[in-house]
Amino acid sequence: MRLSRYFLPTLRDNPKEAEIVSHRYMLRAGMIQQNAAGIYSWLPMGFKVLKKIEQIVREEQDRSGAQEILMPTIQPADLWRESGRYDDYGKEMLRIQDRAERDMLFGPTNEEMVTDIFRSHVKSYKDLPKNLYHIQWKFRDEVRPRFGVMRGREFLMKDAYSFDLTEEDAKIAYQKMFLAYLRTYKRMGLKAIPMRAETGPIGGDMSHEFIILAETGESEVFADKKWENVDLEAAGLSYEDLNGLNEYFEEKTSIYAATDEQHDPGAIAEDQLMTARGIEVGHIFNFGTKYSKPMGATVQNKDGDVVPVEMGSYGIGVSRLVGGIIEASHDGDGIIWPEEVAPFDIGLINLKAGDQACDGACEKLYADLSAQGKDVLYDDRDARAGEKFANMDLIGLPWQVTIGPKGVANGMAEVKNRKTGEKHEISIESAMEKLAA
Amino acid sequence: MRLSRYFLPTLRDNPKEAEIVSHRYMLRAGMIQQNAAGIYSWLPMGFKVLKKIEQIVREEQDRSGAQEILMPTIQPADLWRESGRYDDYGKEMLRIQDRAERDMLFGPTNEEMVTDIFRSHVKSYKDLPKNLYHIQWKFRDEVRPRFGVMRGREFLMKDAYSFDLTEEDAKIAYQKMFLAYLRTYKRMGLKAIPMRAETGPIGGDMSHEFIILAETGESEVFADKKWENVDLEAAGLSYEDLNGLNEYFEEKTSIYAATDEQHDPGAIAEDQLMTARGIEVGHIFNFGTKYSKPMGATVQNKDGDVVPVEMGSYGIGVSRLVGGIIEASHDGDGIIWPEEVAPFDIGLINLKAGDQACDGACEKLYADLSAQGKDVLYDDRDARAGEKFANMDLIGLPWQVTIGPKGVANGMAEVKNRKTGEKHEISIESAMEKLAA
């Protein structure tokens, strides 16, 4: 993409309303624009990152055996009256009357609706287990929306719902999601630590939050120092290997980790403890028959008995992760994107747009890298070098390559790694080789 | 995907509430489920088709130079007060008050919001042209939602918005979208005919609807018989070739085509006229400064004058297209998916699940076809042959391959083309070769 054509409205100054670094950088990098309190538009570069994160979440859900559906944003209130949550939910729920004066709402979560879908179609244990997920916009009418996409009102969430015949099967479903979550975060360049959590308005008796560590995190967390070296991905572990899955789960949940509210200072030796700031990026729940019982979601078991189905739900804040990744990966100059979620692979800077030699070398490199499948943002604008460098650091692509009038005379380019800051002046051919790898 | 694990709740009987064939088949094939009047969930197979259509729309928008963003579903009413449409829009607009009693609405379209985004950032003709699009759920509170996803209340739309300095430039933007639309429909196996149209509540002075022909179409349309053989794709035409683009546009718009309201019986000779039923699947508008003037979306031109920007908007009903394609492509047994949007490439039927030879041959073919990148739905259930055949015809995958106990003894399978109905008994190796091609 040529920057001269791209809609990337970067800002030089820090927007006053932004209190935290991810919000500041997302506004400055032209990723989002606020349309109302806690409601944002995703501009082209922000949208690209959001889609990359969504796609990683999707791939890891699919890999675990969950199946994607898509439920609507608007739900009938009657479903929530069946579970009893319509009155419980309070003012965070955006309540709506349609033209026929029926009570509707903008879904903050989908336990009731997915239970309704399930009970309409599934009647036998033979159709279990099932795990259905969707990635859809939700609305929570926060009293005080803030921190940009980290605590917005309209937000993109992946929510999965598992249905099983027995408590033991439901635990397997829970363990599969547990592994899928840790793989998901790892692929985004994040280390997320699972912590036992309160179940809150979703309910249930087992629940974990997934917390990423970031200096600017919203709350204090306490964890065993072992977490620094734990293998969370477990690359060889298959979802069909139920023993392996159970071992993985037991091992990870046995290493101490707790949020502020749940921390027990006596549970772990001082010298084994690390204290850090954390950001919640996922939350999973096993809540048994909390919804299936009142809503009549039952199946026949092998003996012909009709029993309520065992359920769990599993959320990842997809739009929140965009902010979370920036909180975990930035410096004073801007964002540092992990490669898997970077909006472009490479930023190409033409230091003297209009100069025949610079234009020619840049165009060739742009075409060659693109032909190798690299997604390149080419700064072809007529602007000052300092502005171009600052802009490229701000938007934080993993690699920068700069071609200027001095170097090009000798066939040289400068290649910079955004994360380490390392710069090398090398031949344009070597740059091509290095970056296309 | 193994059918025994897939959430595909097909129905044997026609649902009473469904008046048209696409609605009937989408319910029967387990693609959607109604959650409230005109509000649907997309179950796994329906979701796959929806995503394939969305992806074709996206690729053709990108190819034309449009850039993808994502605006929220909930909009502040104040934006619509600026354009004057807040009061005009009537009861179709879903109006909402948030907890702070601010007037909000669920967007039925986004002219105001995108104009606000534009005016916040773009100040100079140097940043033009721009075309920004998004693919987002909209809500129109229809008095009488019906026909399934064809006239729902919550629906997925692609809407693009072009911004240009002059009327001539705006016409180029319009022509690019015109070509992109015809390419989009072609890729989905549809012939869509552009027809001059009324501008309605969007406004403006040039507008075309894109209509696909289907016996069950919602309205009568009149078109020159020439349309049967027109090349709509114009594969070699580049979006940079402005003369070619203009010629293409002038040629296509010179061939007679009109909706019922706009038909002039004197405009074309009787023997050149074809009459058919049509379904609207897209609508494009050039409306000049209708929004930019009242909302102050201006740019500086080369002379330093500040002028309102020239705009157009361009909609494709993404969720509606799922129904539209079925209306245009089905028979008495079920859906006939065009290859590009089919939920799976191939349906594999095991006539005797549990039989060692049948299971072995099916598992091998399933693995081999999958390894060749084919997306296979494998009916591994223990069910009657007749039920399996009827089910596979209903869901309409392009190819079916059946392995039964008689054939497998001789290494034979039956391959059926869903569209033509042609069946061939060939060796399993030949079936593999044919289907992997």
Image: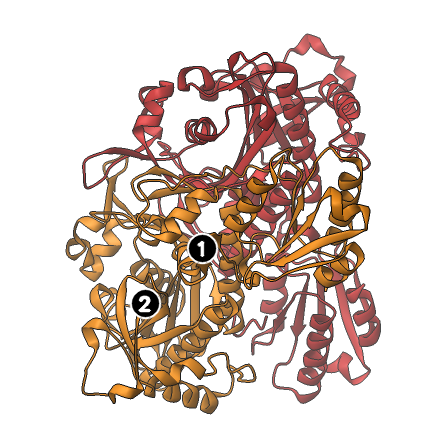
Chain colours: A orange, B red
Question: Residue at coordinates 47% horizontally, 58% vertically from top-left?
Answer: B43
Give B306 or A61, whichever is nearer the viewer. Answer: B306
Question: Residue at coordinates 75% horizontally, 24% vertically from top-left?
Answer: B242
Q: Residue A46: in sight, yes or no? A: yes
- Residue indicated by mark 1: A70
Q: Label 1: chain?
A: A
- Residue indicated by mark 2: A278
Percent coordinates x, y for residue A311 in the rendering: 32, 73
Q: Label 2: chain?
A: A
Local SS, label 1: loop
Residue B261 in the figure: left or right of residue B330: left
The first of marks 2 and 1 along the sequence is 1
Local SS, label 2: strand
Q: Amino acid at mark 2?
A: Gly
User: How far apart are the two marked residues, 2 and 1, measured between alpha carbons?
Assistant: 31 Å
Give A291 or A298, whichever is nearer the viewer. Answer: A291
Q: Residue B21: in sight, yes or no? A: no
Q: How many marks?
A: 2
